[in-house]
Amino acid sequence: MQTNMKKTMLTALAALLVAVPAAQAQKVNEAALLSKIEKSDADIADAKKNVKAATWINRAKAYYDAAAEPTKNLFVGMDASMLKLNAAVGEPASTGKAQVNGESYQTMVYPYFTVYVKDGKVVTWQQTRQVLDGAIDKAVEAYNKAYELDPKAVEKVKAGLKQISDYCSQVGNAGLDLGTYAAAADAYMQAYGAQSSPAYGEADPMLLYYAGYLRTIDGSNDPASFALGADYLNRALEKGYADEEGNIYYYLFHCYYGQKAQDPAFVLKSKDALLAGIEKFPKNERILDGLMQLYTTEQGVGDPADLVALIDAAIADNPSNTDLWFGRGRIFYAMKNYDESIASFAKVVELQPEMFEGNYYLGVFYTIKGDALNQEMNAKQYSSQSDYDADLAAVNQVYLAAVPWFEKAHELKPEDVDTLEFLKQLCFRLRDEEGMMDKYQTYNVLYKQAKGLE
């Protein structure tokens, strides 16, 4: 009896599913949305209604709805099949394929947007048609007017401005995923603009950072983006914002450097941006690389030794700062002064013996020094075996010095494949030294296991 009832229920459910009509094409009631705005136009033309905050709040909502309505049913990660079942979205006008930032996507094209799908999930989308251009700006203006008329309406106005900011940030995220960097930057700036309204309070400078970063990327397509990027990033810094790693200074460097064709003075501005960054984030490899690029390729920027003086002065004030010693080692590496690189990272390990990066890079710089000495050997013409053997022994001593630091790094992070590869190669090269062949066999097995080769 129970089995029959279950079959009956399933049959009934199947009948219901079949009976549900297939969703039609995307529906956006433009006429209704625009009608609300027309009604608002009439309201603000009325002398009595014009001075009421509620009139302007309703106007802001009407404009916001016009902007957000077409994409309100979309969210990242939703099943693409759900779009077809949604009565407001329905069947796409067409489907296809697209390449975005090296990724392949299926596309679902609707009258107001194109959806990009991967593995059956919505990844991002691009709005291709607006109900009304400039609707977001009009919505912000209306909320500001409402607050001006009645500061007591602050909570309603702030809630509306947050809704606008969230929507614009979502547009920015979609643009970032699509590689439409300029449009994404503009969306983040709209979000920041909404938050900058008097009723909102403090605007989040991270939005300025996002916009500046995206304009930096877009600079390779449109040099005009560099000037905008520099403006946004400087404004973020003025507001006290810096990302955790300090990359804001590296992006600011690129924004200035990208303008050097217009005015050579931007080269020095780019240098100043990097110097300001390295003072606060001495471990940032991008900033260090940018400084070395400037000091080695641009005339009149300065001597690379100036960088050493800069960081040594900082170390004198804070000798226990491992980040400073880390940065010092990187600078000397760029100058091919491997002994000083080794000395700097030896200090890093002294200060923080259990830091993986310190031990790993100390091993790397010993290896690099050994490689440099080995190249010198290969360029020599030897007249005696004893001279060759003496030089080879000296080179091998340098390689030997690298092994314990890599072994410590392996102890700290056993799964790191690069460390195992260094150990395998070094121990094989030094296989005639006592105990090294056994170590080679051990690390060779571990390396293969880490690479999934056995």
Image (cartoon, rainbow, N blue to C red):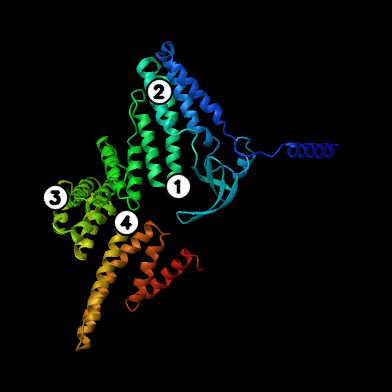
Residue tagged 4: 357
Q: Determine whether the residue tagged by mark 4 lies in a helix, strand or loop.
A: helix
What is the spatial separation of the Cα atoms under label 2 and label 1, in whole angstroms? Answer: 30 Å
Q: Which of marks 3 and 2 is in front?
A: 2
| Residue 320 visible in image | no
The reply, left or right, for residue 235 in relation to residue 178 is left
What is the spatial separation of the Cα atoms under label 1 and label 4, in whole angstroms? Answer: 32 Å
Q: Which of marks 1 and 3 is in front?
A: 1
> Viewer-proximal residue, 374 or 362?
374
- Measured from the top left, where is residue 228 in percent x and y? 29, 43
Residue tagged 1: 177
Instruction: Decide: few, some or many residues near mark 4? Use Cα within 10 Å; few <14, some 14-19, many ≥20.
Output: some
Instruction: Decide: few, some or many residues near mark 2? Use Cα within 10 Å; few <14, some 14-19, many ≥20.
Output: many
What is the spatial separation of the Cα atoms under label 4 and label 3, in whole angstroms? Answer: 24 Å
Residue tagged 2: 143
Instruction: Decide: few, some or many residues near mark 3? Use Cα within 10 Å; few <14, some 14-19, many ≥20.
Output: few
- Measured from the top left, where is residue 273 in percent x and y? 22, 47
Q: How many labels does the image show?
A: 4
Q: What residue type is labelled 3?
A: Ala
Residue tagged 3: 313
